[in-house]
Amino acid sequence: MLGYDLLNEPLNGNFFTDPHRLIPGYLDQTVLQPLYQSLHDVIIAADPGAILMYEPTPFPDTYPVYIHFEGGVHPSGFTRGPARDRVEHQALSYHIYSCGFAATCDRTGDAPADCKDCDDFAKAAVTTRYEDANRVGGGIFLTEFGACSGSEGCIAEIRRVLSFADSAFHSWAYWQFKYNHDITTVSGPLEGFYKTDGSLQTAKVAALSRTYAPVIAGTPQEMTYEPHTGAFRFRYNVQQATAHLPTEVFLNRDLNYNSTEYITSCLNGAIQSNGDILHITPSTAGVQVSVAVARSHKGARVGTLQSSDNDKINWVVSENATSPGFELTTATSITSWKSLKVFGDGEGLLCELSLQDSNHGSAMCDLKSAQQHDLLFRYRIEIWKAKAFGRPALIERIGFSYFGPLLAKRISFAWADDTFARPVHDELVI
Protein backbone atom coordinates (compact mmCIF):
# COMPACT_ATOMS: atom_id res chain seq x y z
CA MET A 1 0.00 0.00 0.00
CA LEU A 2 1.39 3.37 -1.02
CA GLY A 3 -0.35 5.54 1.55
CA TYR A 4 -3.58 6.67 3.19
CA ASP A 5 -5.78 9.17 1.34
CA LEU A 6 -7.44 10.86 4.31
CA LEU A 7 -10.41 12.54 2.63
CA ASN A 8 -11.25 12.67 -1.06
CA GLU A 9 -12.36 16.04 -2.50
CA PRO A 10 -13.56 17.55 0.80
CA LEU A 11 -16.48 19.93 0.40
CA ASN A 12 -16.50 23.35 2.01
CA GLY A 13 -19.82 22.87 3.77
CA ASN A 14 -22.72 25.25 4.15
CA PHE A 15 -21.43 28.62 2.92
CA PHE A 16 -24.88 30.18 3.32
CA THR A 17 -24.57 30.04 7.10
CA ASP A 18 -20.85 30.88 7.00
CA PRO A 19 -19.79 32.96 3.97
CA HIS A 20 -16.13 32.61 5.04
CA ARG A 21 -16.31 29.11 3.54
CA LEU A 22 -16.20 30.77 0.11
CA ILE A 23 -12.74 32.16 0.86
CA PRO A 24 -9.97 30.01 -0.66
CA GLY A 25 -7.89 28.35 2.05
CA TYR A 26 -10.24 29.18 4.93
CA LEU A 27 -11.62 25.68 5.43
CA ASP A 28 -8.19 24.12 4.88
CA GLN A 29 -6.75 25.92 7.87
CA THR A 30 -9.72 26.05 10.24
CA VAL A 31 -11.32 22.62 9.74
CA LEU A 32 -9.24 20.26 7.59
CA GLN A 33 -5.79 20.90 9.09
CA PRO A 34 -6.75 19.94 12.68
CA LEU A 35 -8.82 17.01 11.35
CA TYR A 36 -5.90 15.69 9.28
CA GLN A 37 -3.51 16.02 12.21
CA SER A 38 -5.85 14.06 14.45
CA LEU A 39 -6.14 11.31 11.83
CA HIS A 40 -2.36 11.23 11.55
CA ASP A 41 -1.95 10.55 15.26
CA VAL A 42 -4.38 7.61 15.13
CA ILE A 43 -2.94 6.06 11.95
CA ILE A 44 0.73 6.45 12.90
CA ALA A 45 0.04 4.72 16.22
CA ALA A 46 -1.01 1.63 14.26
CA ASP A 47 1.31 2.04 11.23
CA PRO A 48 4.48 4.01 12.14
CA GLY A 49 5.76 4.01 8.55
CA ALA A 50 2.58 5.34 6.97
CA ILE A 51 2.43 8.14 4.40
CA LEU A 52 -0.67 10.32 4.73
CA MET A 53 -2.09 12.06 1.67
CA TYR A 54 -4.11 15.15 2.45
CA GLU A 55 -6.14 17.29 0.08
CA PRO A 56 -7.39 20.89 0.05
CA THR A 57 -10.95 21.72 -0.94
CA PRO A 58 -11.38 21.57 -4.74
CA PHE A 59 -13.75 24.52 -4.34
CA PRO A 60 -13.27 27.33 -3.35
CA ASP A 61 -9.49 26.76 -3.54
CA THR A 62 -10.13 26.47 -7.27
CA TYR A 63 -12.71 28.71 -8.92
CA PRO A 64 -13.81 28.06 -12.53
CA VAL A 65 -12.14 30.42 -14.98
CA TYR A 66 -15.49 31.87 -16.06
CA ILE A 67 -16.02 33.39 -12.59
CA HIS A 68 -14.42 36.76 -13.19
CA PHE A 69 -11.95 38.17 -10.66
CA GLU A 70 -11.96 34.89 -8.67
CA GLY A 71 -11.33 32.38 -11.45
CA GLY A 72 -8.20 30.29 -11.10
CA VAL A 73 -6.24 28.08 -8.73
CA HIS A 74 -5.60 29.67 -5.32
CA PRO A 75 -3.04 28.66 -2.67
CA SER A 76 -4.30 26.22 -0.06
CA GLY A 77 -4.68 27.42 3.51
CA PHE A 78 -2.50 24.75 5.14
CA THR A 79 0.25 26.06 7.40
CA ARG A 80 1.36 22.55 8.34
CA GLY A 81 0.62 19.10 7.04
CA PRO A 82 -0.97 16.24 8.99
CA ALA A 83 2.45 14.90 10.07
CA ARG A 84 3.49 18.35 11.31
CA ASP A 85 7.31 18.32 11.42
CA ARG A 86 7.72 14.71 10.26
CA VAL A 87 7.24 15.77 6.65
CA GLU A 88 8.50 12.45 5.25
CA HIS A 89 5.14 11.00 6.34
CA GLN A 90 2.93 13.37 4.34
CA ALA A 91 2.13 14.12 0.71
CA LEU A 92 -0.18 16.82 -0.59
CA SER A 93 -2.85 15.35 -2.86
CA TYR A 94 -4.62 17.33 -5.58
CA HIS A 95 -6.75 16.83 -8.70
CA ILE A 96 -6.87 18.48 -12.14
CA TYR A 97 -10.05 18.41 -14.22
CA SER A 98 -10.26 20.95 -17.03
CA CYS A 99 -13.85 19.88 -17.61
CA GLY A 100 -16.08 22.34 -15.77
CA PHE A 101 -13.23 24.37 -14.31
CA ALA A 102 -11.51 25.57 -17.49
CA ALA A 103 -13.76 24.51 -20.36
CA THR A 104 -17.29 23.49 -21.27
CA CYS A 105 -17.12 19.77 -22.01
CA ASP A 106 -19.04 17.69 -24.53
CA ARG A 107 -21.49 14.91 -23.67
CA THR A 108 -18.62 12.44 -23.23
CA GLY A 109 -16.93 14.63 -20.62
CA ASP A 110 -14.07 15.76 -22.83
CA ALA A 111 -12.62 19.26 -23.08
CA PRO A 112 -11.63 20.64 -26.51
CA ALA A 113 -8.30 19.44 -27.87
CA ASP A 114 -7.17 23.02 -28.52
CA CYS A 115 -7.93 24.85 -25.27
CA LYS A 116 -5.71 27.67 -24.01
CA ASP A 117 -7.73 28.05 -20.82
CA CYS A 118 -7.15 24.35 -20.15
CA ASP A 119 -3.40 24.79 -20.69
CA ASP A 120 -3.30 27.77 -18.32
CA PHE A 121 -5.46 25.97 -15.75
CA ALA A 122 -3.31 22.82 -15.70
CA LYS A 123 -0.10 24.86 -15.43
CA ALA A 124 -1.54 26.97 -12.60
CA ALA A 125 -2.73 23.87 -10.71
CA VAL A 126 0.67 22.18 -10.85
CA THR A 127 2.58 25.38 -10.01
CA THR A 128 0.34 26.44 -7.14
CA ARG A 129 0.17 23.02 -5.50
CA TYR A 130 3.96 22.68 -5.92
CA GLU A 131 4.35 25.91 -3.95
CA ASP A 132 1.85 24.65 -1.33
CA ALA A 133 3.82 21.44 -0.79
CA ASN A 134 7.13 23.31 -0.59
CA ARG A 135 5.69 25.65 2.00
CA VAL A 136 4.65 22.91 4.45
CA GLY A 137 7.12 20.19 3.39
CA GLY A 138 6.67 16.62 2.27
CA GLY A 139 5.74 14.96 -1.01
CA ILE A 140 3.07 15.72 -3.59
CA PHE A 141 0.79 13.50 -5.66
CA LEU A 142 -1.62 14.34 -8.47
CA THR A 143 -4.09 11.64 -7.45
CA GLU A 144 -6.80 12.28 -10.08
CA PHE A 145 -7.11 13.65 -13.60
CA GLY A 146 -8.60 12.54 -16.90
CA ALA A 147 -11.88 10.62 -16.53
CA CYS A 148 -12.29 11.09 -20.28
CA SER A 149 -13.53 9.01 -23.18
CA GLY A 150 -10.43 8.45 -25.32
CA SER A 151 -11.28 11.05 -27.96
CA GLU A 152 -8.83 13.56 -29.44
CA GLY A 153 -9.84 16.01 -26.70
CA CYS A 154 -9.22 13.35 -24.04
CA ILE A 155 -5.73 12.54 -25.36
CA ALA A 156 -4.92 16.28 -25.44
CA GLU A 157 -6.08 16.62 -21.81
CA ILE A 158 -3.89 13.71 -20.72
CA ARG A 159 -0.86 15.13 -22.48
CA ARG A 160 -1.32 18.70 -21.23
CA VAL A 161 -1.74 17.66 -17.60
CA LEU A 162 1.13 15.18 -17.61
CA SER A 163 3.55 17.51 -19.38
CA PHE A 164 3.22 19.97 -16.49
CA ALA A 165 3.19 17.25 -13.80
CA ASP A 166 6.34 15.62 -15.21
CA SER A 167 8.14 18.95 -15.44
CA ALA A 168 7.58 19.40 -11.68
CA PHE A 169 8.39 15.72 -10.89
CA HIS A 170 4.93 15.14 -9.42
CA SER A 171 3.67 11.60 -8.99
CA TRP A 172 0.33 11.06 -10.74
CA ALA A 173 -2.52 8.60 -11.21
CA TYR A 174 -5.19 8.62 -13.92
CA TRP A 175 -8.88 8.29 -12.96
CA GLN A 176 -9.69 5.52 -13.53
CA PHE A 177 -8.48 2.05 -14.58
CA LYS A 178 -11.92 0.43 -14.90
CA TYR A 179 -15.38 1.98 -14.93
CA ASN A 180 -16.93 0.13 -11.95
CA HIS A 181 -20.22 2.05 -12.28
CA ASP A 182 -18.67 5.41 -11.40
CA ILE A 183 -21.46 7.97 -10.88
CA THR A 184 -19.18 10.98 -10.36
CA THR A 185 -18.06 11.66 -13.94
CA VAL A 186 -19.61 12.25 -17.37
CA SER A 187 -17.69 9.85 -19.62
CA GLY A 188 -19.29 6.76 -18.14
CA PRO A 189 -17.95 3.36 -19.26
CA LEU A 190 -15.39 4.98 -21.59
CA GLU A 191 -13.45 6.78 -18.84
CA GLY A 192 -11.33 3.70 -18.04
CA PHE A 193 -8.75 1.83 -20.09
CA TYR A 194 -11.28 -0.39 -21.86
CA LYS A 195 -14.04 0.03 -24.42
CA THR A 196 -17.50 -1.36 -23.77
CA ASP A 197 -16.60 -4.52 -25.75
CA GLY A 198 -13.63 -5.16 -23.45
CA SER A 199 -10.93 -4.14 -25.93
CA LEU A 200 -8.10 -1.85 -24.82
CA GLN A 201 -8.19 1.89 -25.58
CA THR A 202 -4.70 1.77 -27.04
CA ALA A 203 -4.35 5.51 -27.79
CA LYS A 204 -5.27 6.43 -24.22
CA VAL A 205 -2.89 3.88 -22.71
CA ALA A 206 -0.09 5.07 -25.02
CA ALA A 207 -0.72 8.67 -23.91
CA LEU A 208 -0.46 7.59 -20.28
CA SER A 209 2.57 5.34 -20.83
CA ARG A 210 5.18 8.08 -20.99
CA THR A 211 8.95 7.82 -20.85
CA TYR A 212 10.03 8.84 -17.35
CA ALA A 213 12.51 8.13 -14.54
CA PRO A 214 10.87 6.05 -11.76
CA VAL A 215 14.17 5.63 -9.85
CA ILE A 216 16.54 8.60 -9.47
CA ALA A 217 19.83 8.20 -7.60
CA GLY A 218 20.44 11.93 -7.25
CA THR A 219 18.67 15.29 -7.40
CA PRO A 220 16.40 15.67 -10.45
CA GLN A 221 16.73 18.85 -12.51
CA GLU A 222 14.67 18.35 -15.68
CA MET A 223 12.35 15.75 -17.18
CA THR A 224 10.65 16.48 -20.52
CA TYR A 225 8.79 14.10 -22.83
CA GLU A 226 7.22 14.86 -26.22
CA PRO A 227 4.67 12.14 -27.08
CA HIS A 228 4.40 13.04 -30.78
CA THR A 229 8.08 12.27 -31.40
CA GLY A 230 9.07 10.16 -28.40
CA ALA A 231 11.80 12.67 -27.57
CA PHE A 232 12.83 12.59 -23.92
CA ARG A 233 15.38 14.51 -21.88
CA PHE A 234 16.26 13.90 -18.25
CA ARG A 235 18.93 15.60 -16.14
CA TYR A 236 19.95 14.93 -12.53
CA ASN A 237 22.82 15.84 -10.21
CA VAL A 238 24.89 13.07 -8.63
CA GLN A 239 26.01 13.25 -4.99
CA GLN A 240 28.82 11.28 -3.39
CA ALA A 241 26.37 9.17 -1.39
CA THR A 242 24.45 8.04 -4.49
CA ALA A 243 27.23 7.88 -7.11
CA HIS A 244 27.38 4.07 -6.95
CA LEU A 245 23.61 3.63 -7.40
CA PRO A 246 21.88 3.24 -10.78
CA THR A 247 19.08 5.43 -12.06
CA GLU A 248 16.28 3.90 -14.11
CA VAL A 249 14.37 5.31 -17.09
CA PHE A 250 11.23 3.52 -18.28
CA LEU A 251 10.17 3.60 -21.91
CA ASN A 252 7.35 1.59 -23.47
CA ARG A 253 9.02 0.28 -26.61
CA ASP A 254 5.96 -1.41 -28.09
CA LEU A 255 3.58 1.53 -27.73
CA ASN A 256 5.87 4.53 -28.21
CA TYR A 257 9.03 3.41 -30.03
CA ASN A 258 7.97 0.64 -32.43
CA SER A 259 9.78 -1.95 -30.29
CA THR A 260 13.43 -1.11 -31.14
CA GLU A 261 13.43 1.96 -33.39
CA TYR A 262 14.95 4.50 -31.03
CA ILE A 263 18.32 5.90 -30.07
CA THR A 264 19.70 6.82 -26.66
CA SER A 265 22.46 9.08 -25.44
CA CYS A 266 23.99 9.73 -22.03
CA LEU A 267 26.34 12.53 -21.01
CA ASN A 268 28.54 11.99 -17.91
CA GLY A 269 27.34 8.44 -17.58
CA ALA A 270 26.61 5.14 -19.31
CA ILE A 271 23.38 3.44 -20.43
CA GLN A 272 22.58 -0.25 -20.27
CA SER A 273 19.28 -1.33 -21.81
CA ASN A 274 17.20 -4.12 -20.28
CA GLY A 275 13.88 -4.40 -22.09
CA ASP A 276 11.79 -1.32 -21.32
CA ILE A 277 14.22 -0.15 -18.60
CA LEU A 278 17.36 1.92 -19.21
CA HIS A 279 19.87 1.63 -16.35
CA ILE A 280 21.95 4.80 -16.00
CA THR A 281 25.31 4.71 -14.21
CA PRO A 282 27.08 8.05 -13.59
CA SER A 283 30.74 8.44 -14.48
CA THR A 284 31.59 9.93 -11.09
CA ALA A 285 30.15 11.91 -8.19
CA GLY A 286 29.59 15.65 -8.51
CA VAL A 287 28.48 15.58 -12.15
CA GLN A 288 25.19 16.31 -13.85
CA VAL A 289 24.01 13.34 -15.88
CA SER A 290 21.92 14.03 -18.98
CA VAL A 291 19.92 11.28 -20.69
CA ALA A 292 18.20 11.67 -24.07
CA VAL A 293 15.95 9.31 -26.03
CA ALA A 294 14.42 9.83 -29.46
CA ARG A 295 12.82 7.73 -32.16
CA SER A 296 15.06 6.87 -35.07
CA HIS A 297 14.96 9.46 -37.85
CA LYS A 298 12.20 8.58 -40.33
CA GLY A 299 12.16 11.75 -42.42
CA ALA A 300 14.08 12.64 -45.55
CA ARG A 301 17.87 12.54 -45.32
CA VAL A 302 18.39 15.09 -48.10
CA GLY A 303 16.37 18.04 -49.30
CA THR A 304 16.32 21.58 -50.63
CA LEU A 305 15.06 24.61 -48.78
CA GLN A 306 13.82 27.56 -50.80
CA SER A 307 14.06 30.66 -48.66
CA SER A 308 11.76 33.67 -48.61
CA ASP A 309 14.35 35.30 -50.89
CA ASN A 310 14.06 32.37 -53.33
CA ASP A 311 17.57 31.21 -52.47
CA LYS A 312 18.12 27.47 -52.73
CA ILE A 313 19.91 25.75 -49.87
CA ASN A 314 20.55 22.03 -50.03
CA TRP A 315 20.77 20.07 -46.79
CA VAL A 316 21.85 16.58 -45.74
CA VAL A 317 21.13 14.87 -42.41
CA SER A 318 23.63 12.19 -41.39
CA GLU A 319 24.07 10.02 -38.32
CA ASN A 320 27.04 11.17 -36.25
CA ALA A 321 27.14 10.19 -32.59
CA THR A 322 30.78 11.19 -32.09
CA SER A 323 30.68 14.76 -33.45
CA PRO A 324 27.10 15.98 -33.97
CA GLY A 325 26.79 19.53 -35.27
CA PHE A 326 26.39 21.67 -38.38
CA GLU A 327 28.27 22.56 -41.56
CA LEU A 328 27.85 25.41 -44.06
CA THR A 329 29.21 25.74 -47.59
CA THR A 330 28.37 28.09 -50.46
CA ALA A 331 28.64 27.75 -54.22
CA THR A 332 31.77 29.30 -55.77
CA SER A 333 29.60 31.87 -57.53
CA ILE A 334 28.39 33.28 -54.21
CA THR A 335 30.58 35.98 -52.66
CA SER A 336 28.13 37.80 -50.39
CA TRP A 337 27.92 37.17 -46.65
CA LYS A 338 25.90 34.16 -45.52
CA SER A 339 25.32 32.95 -41.99
CA LEU A 340 23.70 30.16 -40.02
CA LYS A 341 22.67 30.53 -36.36
CA VAL A 342 21.50 27.60 -34.23
CA PHE A 343 19.52 28.18 -31.04
CA GLY A 344 18.83 25.29 -28.64
CA ASP A 345 15.70 24.28 -26.76
CA GLY A 346 16.54 26.77 -24.04
CA GLU A 347 16.85 29.65 -26.57
CA GLY A 348 20.63 29.90 -26.12
CA LEU A 349 22.88 30.33 -29.17
CA LEU A 350 24.67 27.01 -29.71
CA CYS A 351 26.72 27.92 -32.76
CA GLU A 352 27.07 30.48 -35.56
CA LEU A 353 28.62 29.87 -38.97
CA SER A 354 29.51 32.57 -41.52
CA LEU A 355 31.05 32.62 -45.01
CA GLN A 356 31.95 35.53 -47.30
CA ASP A 357 33.92 36.51 -50.42
CA SER A 358 36.26 33.72 -51.51
CA ASN A 359 35.63 31.65 -48.40
CA HIS A 360 33.10 29.03 -49.47
CA GLY A 361 33.62 26.69 -46.56
CA SER A 362 33.06 24.41 -45.15
CA ALA A 363 32.47 26.23 -41.88
CA MET A 364 31.85 23.69 -39.13
CA CYS A 365 30.35 23.68 -35.66
CA ASP A 366 30.82 20.62 -33.45
CA LEU A 367 28.37 20.67 -30.57
CA LYS A 368 30.01 20.62 -27.16
CA SER A 369 29.17 17.71 -24.90
CA ALA A 370 26.73 19.74 -22.80
CA GLN A 371 24.91 20.95 -25.96
CA GLN A 372 24.25 17.60 -27.60
CA HIS A 373 20.83 17.15 -25.96
CA ASP A 374 19.64 20.70 -26.69
CA LEU A 375 17.97 19.99 -30.06
CA LEU A 376 15.00 17.84 -29.09
CA PHE A 377 11.98 20.10 -28.59
CA ARG A 378 12.01 23.84 -29.32
CA TYR A 379 15.24 24.58 -31.15
CA ARG A 380 15.46 26.83 -34.21
CA ILE A 381 17.89 27.41 -37.06
CA GLU A 382 18.11 30.92 -38.49
CA ILE A 383 19.43 31.61 -41.99
CA TRP A 384 20.88 35.08 -42.63
CA LYS A 385 22.31 36.88 -45.65
CA ALA A 386 23.62 40.30 -46.58
CA LYS A 387 21.11 42.52 -48.34
CA ALA A 388 21.52 46.02 -49.76
CA PHE A 389 24.56 47.91 -48.40
CA GLY A 390 25.70 44.73 -46.69
CA ARG A 391 23.05 44.85 -44.02
CA PRO A 392 22.26 41.42 -42.54
CA ALA A 393 18.71 40.11 -42.91
CA LEU A 394 16.98 37.04 -41.52
CA ILE A 395 15.50 35.25 -44.53
CA GLU A 396 14.37 31.94 -43.03
CA ARG A 397 13.72 30.30 -39.68
CA ILE A 398 13.33 26.52 -39.39
CA GLY A 399 13.58 24.04 -36.58
CA PHE A 400 11.74 21.31 -34.73
CA SER A 401 8.76 21.18 -37.08
CA TYR A 402 11.12 20.90 -40.07
CA PHE A 403 13.68 18.31 -38.94
CA GLY A 404 12.18 16.87 -35.76
CA PRO A 405 14.40 15.87 -32.81
CA LEU A 406 18.11 16.04 -33.61
CA LEU A 407 20.01 13.53 -31.51
CA ALA A 408 23.41 12.28 -32.70
CA LYS A 409 22.91 14.02 -36.04
CA ARG A 410 24.98 16.28 -38.27
CA ILE A 411 23.32 18.62 -40.79
CA SER A 412 25.24 19.99 -43.75
CA PHE A 413 23.84 23.08 -45.48
CA ALA A 414 25.05 23.98 -48.99
CA TRP A 415 23.98 27.40 -50.30
CA ALA A 416 23.49 26.54 -53.98
CA ASP A 417 21.80 29.57 -55.50
CA ASP A 418 21.62 33.19 -54.40
CA THR A 419 18.87 34.91 -56.36
CA PHE A 420 19.42 38.39 -54.99
CA ALA A 421 23.15 38.31 -54.29
CA ARG A 422 24.91 41.67 -54.21
CA PRO A 423 28.57 42.60 -53.74
CA VAL A 424 29.38 43.03 -50.08
CA HIS A 425 32.32 44.84 -48.48
CA ASP A 426 33.76 43.58 -45.23
CA GLU A 427 33.38 46.86 -43.40
CA LEU A 428 29.64 46.98 -44.14
CA VAL A 429 28.81 43.58 -42.69
CA ILE A 430 27.36 43.84 -39.21
Image (tube, rainbow, N blue to C red):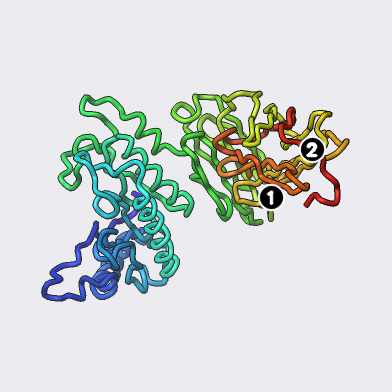
10 Å crowding of disc 1: few (<14), some (14-19), many (20+):
some
Query: Which disc, if any, is residue 168?
Result: none
In this picture, is 233 found above or below 81? above
Q: Position of residue 326 (x, y in %)?
A: 73, 36
Q: Secondary structure at mark 2?
A: strand
Q: Quadrant of residue 20?
A: bottom left
Q: Residue at x 16, y 67 (%)?
A: 13
Q: Position of residue 66 (x, y in %)?
A: 26, 59
- From this viewpoint, is residue 33 visible? no
Q: Quadrant of residue 75?
A: bottom left
Q: Residue at x 29, y 68 (%)?
A: 69
In this picture, is 250 found above or below 303? below
Q: Which residue is mark 1?
A: 349
Q: Position of residue 398 (x, y in %)?
A: 60, 38
Q: Which residue is mark 2?
A: 364
* Residue type of the residue flagged with mark 2: Met
Horizontal side of 253 relative to 100 (left or right) equals right
